[in-house]
Image (cartoon, rainbow, N blue to C red):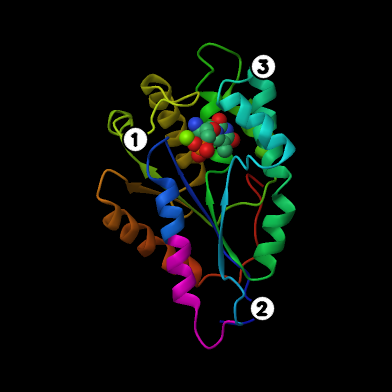
Amino acid sequence: MSSLARGVFIVIEGLDRSGKSTQVARLVDRIQSATTDASSSGSTPRAVPLKFPDRTTAIGKMIDAYLRSESDLDDHAIHLLFSANRWELAPKIEALLASGTTIVADRYAFSGIAFSAQKSPHLNLTFEWCKAPEIGLPAPDLTLFLDVKPEIAMQRGGYGEERYEKQEVQTRVRQVFERIGEEIGADRWVVIDAGQDRDKVGDDIWNRVVPVLRDTHKPVTRLWH
Ligand code: NYM
Ligand code: MG
């Protein structure tokens, strides 16, 4: 690997309990071991996980309170906080990629749009309005959408603890994700059958990621530019 090669920006998206966190950890490990060879510099990590929302920042703490229903916020305001939580980490994303570190993010702008726009039957959060604050963020090179039926996801442990973890909400979220996937296009948005066992899901993800890891010579683009 050339020392000039940038890192690759990979995002894993999906409904709640679609297995994202497990697969993010596995993918980071797999990239890490695949790139640990004579050319990698000592202990420098070649892949790191990120998670959105990042609940550790000041903005993230407000988001966390909202998700745990400890606070109520106007739907537009919480939408903009989720987006601001990405913008506050955008310089870090750019710096990591520039330094040659690959990023595997658990959710990103697409969750931001899907979870807010699903509210539009009741409110005035149109798809375009929800998308606007995400325009210009660093664009993932590849997004893997872990597709699982809401009725399967809700049988998994821990379901229903937080806001949005209801079958009818998740069904609408999935529809918005489908629209986003069509907009992003098949070269950067891949649907993975997440109803399969974990190892098979991991292998399907890996097969799609390998070619993208080699493709590090084009510049990082920006969402919807
Ligand atoms: N969520 C996540 C949003 O509503 N907007 C966003 O921009 C992001 C990143 O927060 N139900 C929702 C999706 C989830 C919830 O995510 C928390 P997680 O991965 O369960 O911590
Ligand atoms: Mg959750």
Decide which of tag 1 and tag 2 comes sooner along the chain: 2
Q: Secondary structure at mark 1?
A: loop
Residue indicated by mark 1: 157
Please identify, in this view, whether the residue under mark 1 or under mark 3 is nearer the observer: 1
Boundaries of the magenta span: 27-40
The front one of 100 and 70 is 70
Q: CA distance from mark 3 to mark 2?
A: 45 Å
The correct choice, above or below, for 12 with respect to 46 in the image is above
Q: Is residue 132 magenta?
A: no
Determine contact: label 1, label 3, CB under 8 Å.
no
Amino acid on which the number 1 mark rests in the picture: Gly
Please identify, in this view, whether the residue under mark 1 or under mark 2 is nearer the observer: 1
> Magenta stretch: dominant SS?
helix
- Whether residue 216 sits left or right of residue 148 in the image: it is right
What's the mark number on residue 84?
A: none
Residue indicated by mark 3: 74
Q: CA distance from mark 1 to mark 2?
A: 43 Å
Decide which of tag 3 and tag 2 comes sooner along the chain: 2
Give x and y (percent) for residue 175.
41, 29
Picture residue at 72% right of the left edge, 43% below the top: 87
Give x and y (percent) for residue 126.
59, 22
Graded by Cα atoms within 10 Å as few (under 14), some (14 to 19) or many (20 or more), the crowding at tag 2 reads few
Picture residue at 25% right of the left edge, 48% below the top: 196
The correct choice, above or below, for 72 with respect to 39 in the image is above
Q: Secondary structure at mark 2?
A: loop
Residue indicated by mark 2: 4
Graded by Cα atoms within 10 Å as few (under 14), some (14 to 19) or many (20 or more), the crowding at tag 3 reads few
The correct choice, above or below, for 62 with respect to 33 in the image is above
Q: Is any part of residue 132 visible from this angle?
A: no
Give x and y (percent) for residue 55.
63, 39
Q: Is any part of residue 202 visible from this angle?
A: yes
